[in-house]
Image (cartoon, rainbow, N blue to C red):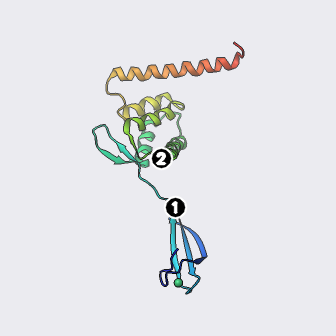
Amino acid sequence: MQCPACRHKESHVLESRSADLGRSVRRRRECLRCQERFTTYERVEVIPLMVLKRNGGRESFSRSKILHGLSRACEKTTVTPKQVRLIVDDLESFLQQRNYREITSKDLGELILDRLAQLSEVAYIRFASVYGQFTSTDDFFAILRLLEKRNEESLQWHQNLSTPGS
Ligand SMILES: [Zn+2]
C-alpha cells in the first residue's frame, strides 16, 4: 500500500480492527520511510446479482424481499422463522459459490421451492402462488402431482433402506 505522503510502498500495520459490522477491516498503517500514518480499508468485493423478471425487466437480488415473501408463505405452518432464514442463507451461498451474475425469477423461485419442499407442503404451495409460479388451476394441480411424486420417491427410498438386497 503506497504511502500517501512519500509514495513509499512499504508500511507496517499498527492496528487492525473490524469495521462496518464485520464486512470490512480497518488498518492503521505507518510508512516505513517517512513514518506518515494512514488508514486503509479492506472489504470483499460484492458483485451484485441481477434477477431477470418475467416482464423482461431486471432488478438486483434482494435478500429482504425473498425473506419477506418466504415468511408470508410460511405463516401458520410448521416452518419456523429460523428455518426461513436458513433457507435464504443457503440460497445466497449457493448463488455466490456458483458465481451467478444473473438468474431468471423463475429459476430463483424454483431454487427456493426445492428447499421449501423438504420442510412443508403447505408453505411450498403458498410460496408457489405468491411467487406467481402458477397462473391457472392446471398449474396448481401440476404442482400437487409433483409433490405426490416426491413423496412416493422418498417413500421408496425408505423402503429400499429397510429391505437391503431386494
Ligand atoms: Zn511515507
Residue at which label 2 appears: 99
Question: Mark 2 vs mark 1: which is more N-terminal?
Answer: 1
List the single residue furthest toward the bottom: 34
Estimate how packed mark 1 is, as few (under 14), some (14 to 19) or many (20 or more) residues with alpha carbons within 10 Å. Answer: few
List the single residue furthest toward the right: 165
Where residue 71 is drawn, which disc sits there?
Answer: none
Q: Give the mark count.
A: 2
Estimate how packed mark 2 is, as few (under 14), some (14 to 19) or many (20 or more) residues with alpha carbons within 10 Å. Answer: few
CB-based contact (under 8 Å), mark 2 and mark 1: no
Instruction: State the image quarter where residue 108 is shown.
Output: top left
Q: Quadrant of the C terminus?
A: top right
Where residue 23 is drawn, which disc sits there?
Answer: 1
Q: How far across and how far down the image is residue 17, in percent?
A: 58, 70
Mark 2–mark 1 Cα distance, whole angstroms, equals 19 Å
Q: Amino acid at mark 1?
A: Arg
Q: How far across and how far down the image is residue 41, in percent?
A: 51, 69
Q: Amino acid at mark 2?
A: Asn
Asked if 110 appears above or below 9 in the picture, the reply is above
Asked if 23 appears above or below 5 in the picture, the reply is above
Nearest to the eye among marks 2 and 1: give it: 2
Q: Secondary structure at mark 1?
A: loop
Question: Residue shown at 68%/20% (left/top)?
Answer: 161
Asked if 92 appears above or below 39 in the picture, the reply is above
Q: Secondary structure at mark 2?
A: loop
